[in-house]
Image (tube, rainbow, N blue to C red):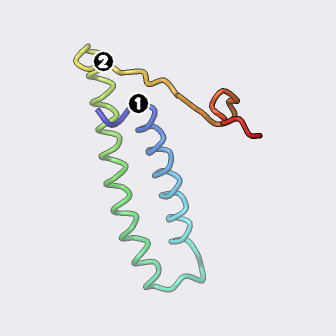
Amino acid sequence: MAETIGSLADKLSIIQLKIFHMREQLARADATAEHKRACSGRLDVMAEQKKDLEEELQKLVSDVAAGRVRLKIYRQFKMYNDPRYRAKTI
């Protein structure tokens, strides 16, 4: 499974921010009709993306709750700022 509950929540928060700012573009008094049409089209695409993400999140949560899916925990193996992984310099 490529997605996690956290990654889906992250994507949902990002798309919601994009929708918010695209709506601001539609409300601009100085925006041309062409700009507003383009923004409106983008909003339609973003609304579909948001709906798809919400459905995917709901399905994942349901599958986890029903025991159909077991989430894996991936450990972070960070090497930076760890002196054990630095070559000795002379």
Q: Which residue is label 1 attached to?
A: 5
Q: Answer few, some or many: residues within 10 Å of disc 2's Cα (few below 14, many 20 plus, some between 14 and 19).
A: few
Q: Secondary structure at mark 2?
A: loop
Locate the N terminus and report the quarter of the image it occupies. top left
In this rendering, would 54 be left or right of 23?
Answer: left
Note whether 58 is above or below 73 in the view shown. below
Q: Earlier in the sequence, mark 2 or mark 1?
A: 1
Which residue is located at x 54 percent, y 71 percent?
25
Furthest-left residue in this view: 68
Is label 2 or label 1 in front? 2
54, 8: nearer the viewer: 8
Q: CA distance from mark 2 to mark 1?
A: 12 Å
Q: Secondary structure at mark 1?
A: helix
Query: Which amino acid is tagged 2?
Result: Arg
90, 56: nearer the viewer: 90
Q: Answer few, some or many: residues within 10 Å of disc 1's Cα (few below 14, many 20 plus, some between 14 and 19).
A: some
In this rendering, would 79 be left or right of 59?
Answer: right
In the rendering, at what x and y percent does residue 88 appear?
A: 71, 35
12, 88: nearer the viewer: 88
In the rendering, at what x and y percent does residue 37 appear?
A: 40, 78
Q: Which residue is label 2 attached to?
A: 70
In the rendering, at what x and y percent does residue 40 appear?
A: 40, 70
Note whether 77 is above or below 52 in the view shown. above
Q: Quadrant of residue 33?
A: bottom left
Locate the C terminus and report the quarter of the image it occupies. top right
Which residue is located at x 46 percent, y 32 percent?
6
48, 79: nearer the viewer: 79
Furthest-right residue in this view: 90
Which residue is located at x 51 percent, y 64 percent?
23
